[in-house]
Image (cartoon, rainbow, N blue to C red):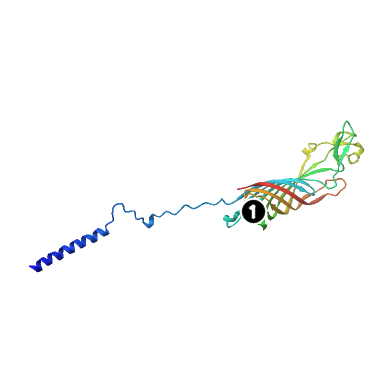
Amino acid sequence: MRSTIGGILLILVCFFATGNAGAQVMPKPGDSTKKVHDYTPPPKIKGPKPIRHEMSGGFRLNTDGWGIYTDIGKVKTKDMRHSDMFHNVRLIQIEFDEKKDPREIKSYSTQGSGTSTYIFGKINNFYTLKLGWGLRKLIAGKPDPGSVSIHWANSGGLALGLLKPYYLNTVSDPGAIKYKDNEVDFLNQGAIEGSAGFMKGINEITFIPGLHFKSALHFDFSTNRKNVIGVEAGFDAEYYSTAVQLMANESATNYFFNLFVAAQFGRRW
């Protein structure tokens, strides 16, 4: 009898022990335990967009005249995160110049009804339109805002010369004359009334193809990464297929060489 009662008690103890163990593994309603795969990383903070393009223009003073130009640039670098350093900028350049002989001197005439100016001995106006391709590379300085960086810029390409005869009004001829029409009166200051003006002879422009090469140091003073504020100083060499004569008392030449300084302003993006 006692053994029977002991067996019954053992069975009841095992039953309740099994029930308690099952209750411990069952999750409670509303359990807030987070799973690993539900983790959301914080959003990344975006930096400034890298500079890829540039466009600028300026005015150039040459030892043989003046010019205006524009540069269209594209940043070329393997690491675009540091493209603001402008290590390599591929450039397309468009430039328009007027050539002047260093011996050109403005003269004044009192012939006729009033006073007029002219360039004594000048027989031709010469303008050039140049298209070039080049590279501007950082060689010194820091790219940080507020600092000055120094670059070496080289470019070259095609040139097109525009040669226009220079006309004078004289007391000996009712119409304006050019050097080839009447060399004697053209060089007689006592007979000169003044220049006939820019438009006279514009229909006689002749086009002369050529080549050019330019090398300069470029100083960038911009304090904003998106602005272009610079100064250039260098030299320019040009060759034309036909010899050009600007003054009556000098020989014609196919070659032009000048030193220049330029101011440049523009924008990067």
Nearest to the observer: residue 115 or residue 124: 115
Q: Is residue 264 visible?
A: yes
| Residue extending furthest toward the left | 1
Nearest to the observer: residue 179 or residue 198: 198
Circle 1 — which element? strand
- Residue 6 point in image, percent of width and height: 12, 67
The image quadrant that residue 126 belongs to is: top right
User: Callout 1: 10 Å neighbours few (<14), some, many (20+)?
Assistant: many
Question: Total of numbered circles in the picture?
Answer: 1
The residue at which mark 1 appears reads as 89
- Residue 266 point in image, percent of width and height: 66, 46
Check disc 1 and give the amino acid type: Val
Q: Is residue 66 above or below residue 23?
A: above
Tell me the quarter of the image containing the N terminus.
bottom left
The image quadrant that residue 27 belongs to is: bottom left
Nearest to the observer: residue 115 or residue 34: 34
Q: Is residue 156 above or below residue 108?
A: below
- Residue 24 point in image, percent of width and height: 26, 59
Nearest to the observer: residue 165 or residue 103: 103
- In the image: residue 129, left or right of residue 115: left
| Residue extending furthest toward the right | 190
